[in-house]
Amino acid sequence: MIENKLCETIKQYEMLQPGDTVLIAVSGGTDSTALLHLLAAVAEKFKLKLQVAHLDHQIRKHEALLDQRFVQQLARKLNLPVTCESFDVPTFAKQEKLGLEDAARRIRYAFLERVANQIKADKIALGHNADDNVETFLMRLLRGAGLKGLSGIPPVRKNIIRPLITTWRKDIEDYVTSLKLVPRRDYTNYESRYLRNRVRLKLLPQLKLYNLNIKEIILQTILLITADHSYLELQAEGLLESAISSCDEDSLKLKIDRLCRAELPIQGHVLRQAILRVKGDLQDLSFQHIQSILHKLRASEKWEIHLPRGIVAYGNQGELKITKEREASEQAQPFAYKFSLPGEVELPFLGKRLRGSFVDQADAVADYSTVAFFDAAVFGQELVVRSRQAGDRLIPLGMKGSKKLQDLFVDEKIPFEFRDRIPVVESLGKIIWVAGVRIDDRAKIKKQTKQIVKLELI
């Protein structure tokens, strides 16, 4: 029985305590509808106080209004208070140069945390299920991930709980059907432009041809990886504490010799934990970032690596300092690197690489922050990626006249301290891409384009 499964999961992962106030995120879909009714059914048993939260992302227009009404009706029938809000996620995604899924997730979590604080909720309950966990594992495997990424979706993370994480989607659907409910259907769950949908609708059916129990096998693998990762994290935590020479709210210093005594995998875990303490999360931090720092640890000269979202790591005199951008004292030095297509070049000051390749078609969701597509006809045999120079000009995409790069930075509100570190890519003496800012209109893909070049920061 699904209710018993839910109770077992709650107890196994110690998700709830008697008297907890729980904010339930309800989209109106099958999973969240089931979660709402299941928690309402066990509320007396666990002595819970429940409240519902629903966010309209302004992506699905008319359907979103029907979603909200459905959620309000569910809450009313269960005699539960409900908070409904809306947010223009598509506009936010464009402004912040984020993918739509990433932007929606960030806004959704911020909304839930804010409402939880307002009502003094102890926990936020989300409707992720076992199928979601399997799909997430495969998505991360395809993109490349370490033990943390392959550990799947955590049942508990701080104040967020996922009581359905061990329950299969089919069982959830059967439960909702037994209640004679008709949840809202999100058509975007069937659009092939989203990787998760392609994994669910195309990849998993193919994998089942090799093993009918592939989902169960993957879920078991997730549990094994999670156990190994937890052990390594525990070891790294002890090493981090012994390696810290000083720390404050915005920075942390480590003794490099103490760090280097450990095995390389443990060093990587320590670095991630150190960055987490300073940054507050590991958003956008990649394997390449950690490797860049590890490669520099034993360097005798001063070095500096810029990590995502304003975090800097730099080494000097046997110490590694991880700090927020404003704490970095070193000024960016001019740089220039050459490479040919297809190929790539290291950008040590960013902890990234710039890769160029020929592709058959452009990705429609490219936002120019880390990837851009161009007409190959504007490229010479050699590309130069460099820091900005006095007098730099380009024709920003969508404009007819040229513009000073300095003026473009001002218009785009790029902080002054970041401008000298932004890669400028040029070919045949002309700027074609200011990474993360804008491409040149002359390099855009046209109807007559015969070959496409993809440039990406990785």
Image (tube, rainbow, N blue to C red):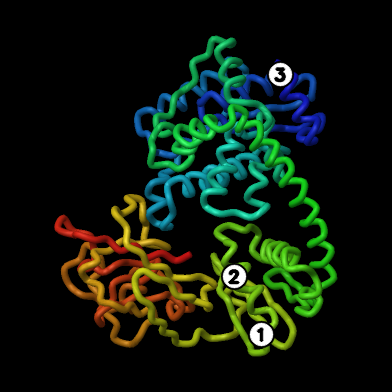
**Alpha-carbon span between mark 2 and mark 1:** 20 Å
- Image location of residue 445, percent across then percent down: 22, 60
Which residue: 25% across, 82% down? 429
Check disc 3 and report the residue beneath it: 3
Q: Which mark is residue 427?
A: none
Q: Earlier in the sequence, mark 2 or mark 3?
A: 3
- Relative to 386, residue 174 above or below: above
**Alpha-carbon span between mark 2 and mark 3:** 45 Å
Quadrant holding the N terminus: top right
Which residue: 63% across, 57% down? 281
- Relative to 90, residue 234 above or below: below
Q: Earlier in the sequence, mark 2 or mark 1?
A: 1
Check disc 2 and report the residue beneath it: 311
Label 2: how many residues lie within 10 Å, few (<14), some (14-19) or many (20+)?
many
Q: Between 46 and 157, which is closer to the camera in this rendering?
A: 157
Label 3: how many residues lie within 10 Å, few (<14), some (14-19) or many (20+)?
some
Q: Which element carries disc 3, helix, strand or loop?
A: helix
- Image location of residue 86, percent across then percent down: 45, 38
Check disc 1 and report the residue beneath it: 299
Which residue: 62% across, 26% down? 168
Amino acid under disc 2: Ile
Splitting the image into 4 quarters, where does residue 438 fall?
bottom left
Q: Which element carries disc 1, helix, strand or loop?
A: loop
Left or right of 121? Residue 29 is: left
